[in-house]
Amino acid sequence: MARGLLSWASLRKICGSHYYIQARLPCVRVKYLFFSWLAVFVGSWVIYVQYSTHTELCRAHDCKKIICDKYKKGIIDGSACGSLCDKGTLYFGKCLSNKPNNQVYRGMWDESQVILKCRLEEPFHFDLDSNMEPRKEMVLFDKPTKGTSMEEFREMVYSLLKAKLGDQTNLQKLLKLVVTVADGNKDGHVSLAEAKSTWALLQLNEFLITVILQDKEHTPKLLGFCGDLYVTEKVHYSYLYGLTIPWVLEFFIPSGLRRSMDQWFTPSWPRKAKISIGLLEFVEDVFHGTFGNFLMCDVSANNIGYNVKHDLKMIDMRKVVPEVSFKQLIGGRHCETDVDCVYGTDCRTTCHQSKKQCSTELDQPNLTKVCTLLKDYLLNGAPPDVREELEKQLYSCIALRGVAGQMEMEHSLILNNLKTLLWKKISHTKDS
Ligand SMILES: Nc1ncnc2c1ncn2[C@@H]1O[C@H](COP(=O)(O)OP(=O)(O)O)[C@@H](O)[C@H]1O
Ligand SMILES: [Mg+2]
């Protein structure tokens, strides 16, 4: 009896109308049907969106096909070609891409875990003509042309480096380095196919900076290449802090809570200090280093990782750009407001209102951006005896401004003081 009353009451509530009893049951059924249909519709839409994003972001098969076809035709060559296309000892694993034209995969090469990066131009369009290949096919690997001598190739590379890095004394040294890398099979000379791969790779910012910093500790090692696909060492932890949460959940978490949640998932303080020293050393490596000055135009925790020993490794250096290239790029840009004068996420200059052109003077040096990123990371859980001094130094670092030439001294001073303070605190612990 009670059950009968209950269901009766709920039916009344659901339908919320004053129709006759006979009319109520179909009404519930219609609502039930409507909600099931809605659930199926929304569910399929989510699956469709996920699937179509996945098919655009993860096209390992296309990457391999394009590269290996070219390799088999003898157009390109490189140290990874044999393993990828002949022996099958280098293969693609989990897809990590966030952008369709920058395909990133975890992979295995013999027994080691590696990262494979491959460029695809336009997202694949479902074209009726199945013979149509991605645009990349047509534009790449056309230089150097057949008959180019080694001397001419050197000149080509030299001019490219000069255009990207500016006229400086160390270019010959860098040219030598590039030529050594280009000789994939280490037979002492660069074949036309190797030269074509190298030329395509040199157009990529991240490849160039990886070669430039290959002896430094904080960049993943370059392990090999084939065409414009390149393989690097895999970094153990690919984020400075935080958890990766599925985007559906991400949507429901307020940003304030998300920020504090991120700070919960960090290593112990001495380890954080060691990672931070690594980041400061990277800033030193790129600030007026051997081959010029580089700007870090996307300083975010997602682009920074560390290995099991808590040595910092930069994982995404596509927005680490030579200052000369940056100035060429932004200098002539038309603008209405300062918002138009941003490169990457955080290389900003101001908009010249009279000329309607972006200026070339950056508002913040790399170090300032790094200190902003490290502030919460380092102050959270800092030992009481260093906290105050650390806070003081971090704030003076964040306040650092000024024209490049004038602030160089102050820059080095702040950087050294911070490194020393952290180092002193952890040098006696086992984590150092
Ligand atoms: N060397 C690496 N070691 C470990 N993970 C990496 C490495 N390079 C990239 N990843 C992972 O792949 C993701 C995408 O790579 P990334 O170079 O940042 O390209 P994008 O900015 O286009 O997403 C990164 O967020 C990171 O999780
Ligand atoms: Mg990235």
Image: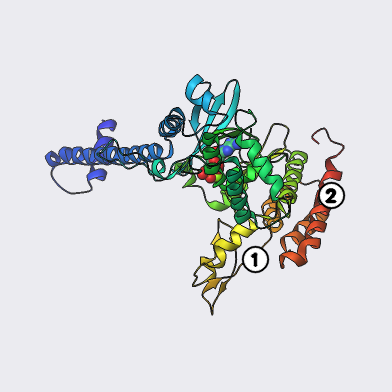
Looking at the image, which is closer to me, 414 or 349?
A: 349
Say few, some or many: other residues with alpha carbon within 10 Å of mark 2 (under 14 / 14 to 19 / 20 or more): some
Q: Position of residue 432 (x, y in %)?
A: 81, 36
Q: Position of residue 177 (x, y in %)?
A: 68, 41
Q: Is residue 72 left or right of residue 189?
A: left
Say few, some or many: other residues with alpha carbon within 10 Å of mark 1 (under 14 / 14 to 19 / 20 or more): some
Looking at the image, which is closer to me, 136 or 167?
A: 167
Residue 268 visible in image: yes
- Report the amino acid beneath label 2: Leu
Which of the 4 image quadrants contains residue 243?
Answer: top right
- Return the residue at label 1: 363
Which of the 4 image quadrants contains residue 52?
Answer: top left
In this view, 203 is above or below 414? above
- Report the amino acid beneath label 1: Asp
> Which residue corresponds to the image point at 53% horizontal and 72% vertical from the top-left?
357
> What is the image's colouring?
rainbow
In this view, 427 is above or below 401? above
Q: Position of residue 123 (x, y in %)?
A: 38, 44
Alpha carbon separation for disc pair 1 and 2: 27 Å
Q: Position of residue 401 (x, y in %)?
A: 71, 66
> Which residue corresponds to the image point at 45% horizontal and 33% vertical from the top-left?
67
Q: Which mark is residue 421?
A: 2
Q: Earlier in the sequence, mark 1 or mark 2?
A: 1
Ligand 1 is found in the corner quadrant, namely top right
